[in-house]
Image (tube, grey):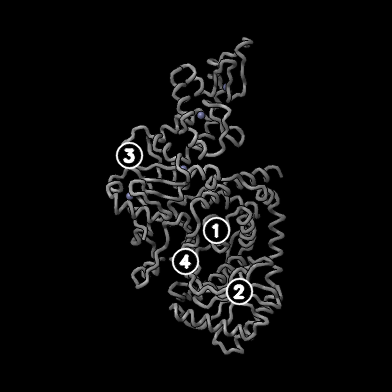
């Protein structure tokens, strides 16, 4: 379990060391944003496109030499702080984009110029942009994927392992609450611990830059945040049209006769084999979020809990044997007996549809009913999710190591809970008054819920979504649809301060197989029923950073599209 001491120490560890930050600050005042690039005015003509490159540059020997030389000439230094550069041939104000040639004696007095209000305005605007770059250094939490202990020559892919190592072997640093022995490389997305006597702080980093791994990553630029893809920009320029099309399509898919054909065939074959089951469909085909090629999720309810690995295996075999009796029609493609949800993947030949059969835990059926209830009661919820599903996939943010469609649904519903005050799951269970426990978790929401909120246009909701998740504090907060409001990660480390509505979560922690909610994952979205389940536990920090970044970028694009129309 991720303990409170670790959370507290993250606040220290991920803050850039004070001395280092001061050095970055003193360098950044000589940087000049140039469309999507950044120019180092000390070295000039050198274009850098991201924070990684800037950090690497200000630590390079060439730059350091010129930086030190600049400080020997008081006059040049003061002018360059004002973005005015004196060269042998000419003098230029970068903020105002004006220059004079020394030979021609056209006399702009740059010492007066820097006091004019127009120059000051220009400078301030540019400084705001530079300020954003500085922010990335102030909080490294979003930029670090890997960890290392140089002293012990150990690398860590998982934060909790690194914290445990520090706690075991270097306990004094956690006790002393200091970050002076940490260094980082944004290019490698790595933070490391190293005791060192070297006073000059950039030397450690320079040594790091010689490493092969660093050189490789510098070329590949794997961890850099890329600009918003063209396909996404196009998508955002046609929100209303695309969203209407997706909505129509999803309605058509919901009434697809082929799906009925498949479920009928399945009911028939389990009947023939005399399997004691009820056949349920769940997932996107039920919630209204499916598109033409979506899989069909089937749950075979045997009416009991099937948890033991042996009985899971036996049951899986039983179902496969049954399907084999009609192998003309059912093609078993893959069986996953040991995953969180064991699954049999089959293809139904006559309809050509793909089908995932699960047979443990009934919670997924309840989840689907819940989502369908929200989508029916408030169709903009469905429209928003359908559009964002497309947005996620074009952004390269979907898939197993990204944000799953299921997690997206809850991000959307949660946003509507916070923004429009649509009901929380706690309230829905309470008002229906038919609470029932399934697989240890409380369910019991009516199939038809009432949402008394005016239907907002899709682009408004989309703007709000991007703004909310673009500014969300992922370092400290958990998205919690059960409550309809955020919950502190800290509360999950201390447990005793969790709200009463999480009593079942606390109770299972005291049981034989406690399952802790994964607060050590960068992104935390709690399942509305299975309160131990972090729906986004597989999302890496850099995936999260990209999600946040794209939300903010999409917000800007969408705003300008709306302003123009
Ligand atoms: Zn430079
Ligand atoms: Zn100027
Ligand atoms: Zn160590
Ligand atoms: Zn590196």
First in sequence: mark 4 or mark 3?
Answer: 3
Which residue corresponds to mark 4?
Answer: 426
Q: In front of the other: label 3 or label 1?
A: 3
Task: Look at 58% across and 58% down and name the residue there.
Answer: 398
Percent x, y for residue 497?
35, 59
| Residue 485, visible in the rendered structure | no
Q: In front of the other: label 4 or label 3?
A: 3
Residue 403's disc is 1
Which residue corresponds to mark 2?
Answer: 333
Q: In front of the other: label 2 or label 4?
A: 2
First in sequence: mark 3 or mark 1?
Answer: 3
Which residue corresponds to mark 3?
Answer: 196
First in sequence: mark 4 or mark 1?
Answer: 1
Mark 3, ligand 3, within 8 Å: the answer is: no
Residue 313's disc is none
Quadrant including the C terminus: top right
Task: Look at 50% across and 40% down and name the residue there.
Answer: 52
First in sequence: mark 2 or mark 4?
Answer: 2
**In the image, ligand 2 is in what quadrant?**
top right
């Amino acid at each position: 379990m991720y303990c409170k001491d670790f959370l507290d120490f993250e606040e220290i560890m991920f803050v850039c060391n004070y001395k280092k930050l001061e050095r970055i600050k003193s360098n950044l005042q000589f940087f000049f944003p140039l469309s999507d690039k950044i120019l180092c005015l000390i070295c000039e003509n050198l274009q850098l496109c991201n924070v990684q490159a800037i950090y690497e540059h200000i630590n390079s020997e060439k730059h350091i030499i010129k930086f030190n030389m600049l400080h020997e000439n008081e006059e040049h230094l003061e002018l360059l702080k004002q973005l005015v550069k004196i060269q042998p041939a000419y003098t230029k104000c970068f903020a105002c984009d004006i220059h004079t040639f020394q030979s021609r004696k056209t006399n702009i007095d740059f010492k007066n110029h820097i006091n004019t209000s127009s120059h000051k305005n220009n400078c301030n605007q540019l400084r705001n942009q530079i300020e954003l770059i500085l922010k990335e250094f102030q909080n490294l939490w979003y930029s670090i994927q890997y960890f290392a202990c140089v002293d012990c020559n150990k690398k860590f892919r998982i934060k909790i392992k690194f914290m445990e190592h520090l706690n075991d072997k270097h306990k004094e640093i956690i006790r002393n609450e200091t970050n002076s022995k940490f260094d980082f490389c944004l290019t490698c997305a790595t933070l490391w611990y190293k005791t060192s006597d070297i006073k000059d702080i950039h030397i450690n980093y320079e040594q790091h830059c010689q490493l092969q791994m660093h050189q490789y990553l510098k070329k590949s630029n794997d961890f850099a945040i890329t600009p918003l893809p063209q396909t996404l920009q196009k998508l955002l320029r046609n929100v209303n049209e695309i969203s209407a099309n997706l909505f129509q399509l999803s309605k058509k898919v919901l009434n697809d006769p082929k799906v009925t054909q498949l479920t009928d065939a399945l009911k028939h074959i389990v009947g023939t084999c005399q399997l004691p089951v009820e056949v349920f469909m769940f997932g996107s085909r039920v919630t209204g979020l499916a598109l033409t090629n979506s899989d069909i999720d089937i749950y075979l309810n045997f009416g009991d809990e099937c948890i033991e690995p042996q009985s899971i295996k036996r049951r899986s075999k039983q179902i496969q044997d049954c399907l084999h009796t009609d192998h003309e029609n059912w093609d078993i493609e893959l069986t996953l007996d040991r995953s969180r949800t064991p699954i049999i993947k089959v293809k139904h030949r006559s309809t050509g549809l793909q089908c995932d059969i699960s047979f443990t835990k009934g919670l997924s059926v309840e989840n689907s009913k819940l989502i369908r209830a929200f989508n029916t009661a408030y169709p903009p919820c469905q429209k928003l999710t359908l559009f964002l599903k497309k947005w996620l996939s074009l952004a390269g943010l979907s898939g197993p190591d990204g944000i799953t469609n299921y997690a997206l649904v809850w991000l959307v519903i949660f946003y509507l809970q916070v923004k429009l005050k649509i009901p929380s799951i706690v309230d829905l269970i309470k008002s229906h008054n038919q609470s029932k426990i399934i697989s240890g978790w409380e369910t019991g929401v009516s199939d038809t819920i009432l949402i008394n909120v005016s239907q907002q246009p899709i682009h408004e909701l989309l703007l709000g979504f991007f703004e909310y998740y673009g500014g969300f504090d992922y370092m400290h907060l958990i998205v919690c649809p059960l409550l309809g409001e955020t919950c502190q990660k800290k509360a999950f480390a201390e447990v005793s301060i969790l709200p009463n509505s999480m009593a079942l979560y606390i109770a299972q922690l005291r049981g034989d197989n406690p399952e802790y909610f994964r607060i050590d994952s960068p992104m935390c979205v709690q399942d509305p029923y299975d309160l131990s389940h972090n729906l986004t536990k597989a999302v890496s920090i850099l995936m999260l950073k990209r999600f946040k970044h794209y939300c903010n970028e999409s917000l800007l694009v969408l705003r300008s599209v709306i302003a123009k129309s």
